[in-house]
Amino acid sequence: MNATSAYEKELGSALKAVRLASKLCQRVQLQLKDGERTDKADDSPVTIADYGAQVLVAWSLQRSLPNKPFSMVAEEDSADLRLPEGAPMAKRITAMVNEVLAEEEPGNKALTEDDVLALIDTGGSEGGPQGQHWVLDPIDGTRGFVGMRQYAVCLGLLDGGQVVVGVLGCPNLPTAQLRDEDGTGNSAEKAGSDGIGVIFAAQKGCGAFAGPLAGDVPPEQCLQLADTQDFSQIRFMESYESRHSDFDFTAKLATKLGVTRPPLRIDSQAKYGVLARADAAINMRFPKPGYREKIWDHAAGALIVQEAGAVISDASGAPLDFGRGRWLDLDRGIVTSTPAVHAALLQAIRDVS
Ligand SMILES: Nc1ncnc2c1ncn2[C@@H]1O[C@H](COP(=O)(O)O)[C@@H](O)[C@H]1OP(=O)(O)O
Ligand SMILES: [Mg+2]
Ligand SMILES: [Mg+2]
Ligand SMILES: [Mg+2]
């Protein structure tokens, strides 16, 4: 093993885990019923697929890397499922996980409800600047998932506070470039069919790659940015959800820069994959003041865009530090772009603020 492929085994395990979890998500999205989603204390939704995907990633990683200590920083925990009113949901998650395992990993013993709850809670690590920690958002963009739009299964690996492996499973993302009119990326009903479903992957120092989510071949298409400073050609991305980011502010920035194409608004870290494959040149995210960003919402995507050649920073230009625990501490928002326009973007932020 040489220095540039030091995390080959971990990358292979991450690809396998994300593909398995994506299978569960696809299955659930097409049959989501009332009672299979609930609202968390912070008012954001969570579904049986968020929990189920977390279970399958933890199960799969532990199984493929049995001799390594396992630490994972993940979004979900089992507290609500252990309440009396959480019991039906816990049952449904267990059934769904076992259904997917029976099909995808035949020959394994079915998981009990206790196994499932314990696997969810393996995501309780605090992360930090030392050692290795997996970082998981089992479904990023749950509102997109529920709305039959884009979402992503996002798995990163931290080593010494740096993201060294990143994988994004995007079951509803077309393999072809997104056009301006594809604003909502609304292709949930076609997930799994030819041309829908992309997996993005990166290993630090080794570039970024994309390929079909289905099957089990490593992603092969090497991603490279189209680096232009012609703002009349440039397209920017932002959240689909106006409650997640300040659209008035990004519109002002676009005007200041001379960007005239409409924003591409899609849910989740799929945006980082889309930027890495050069469908758009800028991704901007300015949540409401007081909102604290979590590391699992950006770790995998940040490595993928950087390995494709993009620059990611907070609104002041500072790099993101994933080694400070479960949260990112940053100034106002997160801006990602091709290198040629990043400085102009930061200047526009200063001018418009
Ligand atoms: N009030 C909020 N403001 C900003 N982001 C939010 C808020 N609530 C949830 N999120 C998170 O924003 C991310 C989605 O980004 P986008 O809006 O770009 O699709 C998700 O990580 C989502 O969490 P979750 O992982 O639970 O879906
Ligand atoms: Mg959530
Ligand atoms: Mg998220
Ligand atoms: Mg999530």
Image (cartoon, rainbow, N blue to C red):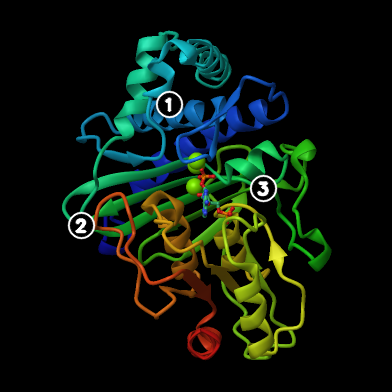
Question: How far across and down, in percent of the image, does residue 144 sit?
Answer: 65, 44
Residue 160: give its label: 2
Q: In the figure, residue 214 lies in which quadrant?
A: top right
346 versus 194 height, above or below: below
Q: Residue, x 46% and y 69% (percent of image)?
A: 333
User: Crowding at label 1, few (<14), some or many (≥20) Cα neighbours within 10 Å?
Assistant: many
Can residue 221 be seen by looking at this rendering? no
Can residue 98 be seen by looking at this rendering? yes
Q: Is mark 3 within 8 Å of ligand 1?
A: yes
Lateral position of residue 12 relative to residue 185, left or right: left
Question: How far across and down, in percent of the image, does residue 268 sit?
Answer: 58, 52
Mark 3 secondary-structure assignment: loop
Mark 3: amino acid: Gln
Q: 150 or 258: nearer the eye?
A: 258
Q: Which dot, 3 or 2, sits closer to the camera?
A: 3
Question: How far across and down, in percent of the image, does residue 43 sit?
Answer: 52, 39
Lateral position of residue 66 relative to residue 346, left or right: left
Q: Which residue is mark 3?
A: 150
Residue 55: give its label: 1
72 versus 274 height, above or below: above
User: Crowding at label 3, few (<14), some or many (≥20) Cα neighbours within 10 Å?
Assistant: many
